[in-house]
Image (tube, rainbow, N blue to C red):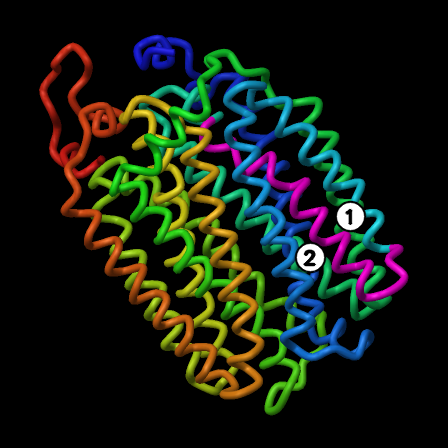
Amino acid sequence: MPEATVAQTGYRPGEAGYRRLSVALFAAGLATFAMLYSTQPLLPELARVFQVSPSQSAFSVSLATLGLGLALLVAGPVSEVLGRTKLMRWSVAVAAAIAVLCTLAPNWTTLLALRGVQGIALAGLPAVAMAYLREEVHADSHARASGLYIAGTAVGGMTGRLVAGGLADLGGWRAALGGIALLGVICAVLVLVLLPDSRNFTRATPNRQTIRVLKDPALLALYGIAATAMGAFVAIYNATGFRLAGAPYGLGPGLAGLVFAVYLVGSASSATAGRLADSFGRRAVVPIGCLVTLTGVAITLAEPLPIVILGLAVMTAGFFAVHGVASGWVAVRAHAGGGGTGQAASLYLFAYYLGSSVFGGLAGTAWTHAAWPGVAAEAGALLLLTLVLALLLRRVPSRAADSASQPGAPSQRGAPSQPGAKLAG
């Protein structure tokens, strides 16, 4: 649909449709990321109960993210034909049902298989959420809405880890996954009831669009940012449970899980980064977020627990600033190139979860051979690559429609540009 039509019909903050959309996507993001990472705070517990190594226990996270990443390659193009809302609703509902089955898994192999299938089911939401927001939210609120959605996923990731860690102390891993399953069912009902149907969706030809979003150098750089930044982030958090369970801390799953409360910082930083991107441009915000993330990883090398938590908070703030801006940028950039927002968002998230699966899994090996300094070195190397890609993005020419997505940028009628608009695309 032409940009002018979307701008006229898109939801604005304060409208009833915007509120319903925000609540539904918040619930969907919360459920998706609570279920996806539900086993992360349980890794030491799973390693003990099932008598597997730290690297093997990390498969309970990596297989779910790998399944999700692979399914994204199908979910994005499918959404261009079938529509956004149906896919999002079914995704959350089916994943919640599988979460219930995970609590009944009789052995390690079955649990891993269910986690892989659950990752596939979860793909429907992240595959199209950003494309749905770009189509249904007014153009002057795209970055803000994207930041709020990413903030919701941060809260979901935190809530799932806190709930799982706390319940594991009370009743073991089955009780932990049961609590997450209940949360998933509640959120699935909210999504089914509240999510507004698409008003601005138009069907597209997936094959042509996919070729386009694989040729744009800016999109390719953003896919690389997704893989390296997420790989570093998950590597740190996968190893954190083992670090806090050992000397000198000796924390159980419940207390160690409290460290995920720093996700609140990520929730705030993604929303703030979205507003800053509206004012100063995405090209300025993403490199700064990379530097903040790298600084946080360096701080975690200290031994005192308060400083370790501070480092995790700084790293989390930087990561969600990068991801919040970059993920919204993908949809806008793809639209500026002629369409294919669903495919571009899917490819971004495929890279995102591929990085999570591969580099997050390697964190177990790094921990076994070199303890925390090895994990920090892995994350630091990945984040340096993220920074290089972010700086290279500054050299890629912007596109008119891309810049026009920002408040104050040139309108299609040729209105004068405002400061900062030239950095938006």
Residue drawn 40% across the image and 45% down it: 324
Residue drawn 46% across the image and 51% down it: 352
Q: Which residue is mark 2?
A: 38
Measuring from the top left, give residue 272's x and y in whole percent.
36, 45
Measuring from the top left, give residue 159's x and y in whole percent.
64, 53
Image quarter (top left, top right, bottom left or bottom right) of the C terminus: top left
Measuring from the top left, give residue 238's x and y in whole percent.
58, 69
| Magenta-highlighted residues | 104-131
The image's mark for residue 99 is 1
Residue drawn 42% across the image and 55% down it: 227
Find residue 88 and report its image quarter. Answer: top right
Whichever of callouts 1 and 2 sits on the residue coming sooner in the sequence is 2
The type of residue carrying mark 2 is Ser
In depth, the one of 280 and 33 nearer the eye is 33
SS label for mark 1? helix
Q: Is residue 51 magenta?
A: no
In depth, the one of 314 and 425 nearer the eye is 425
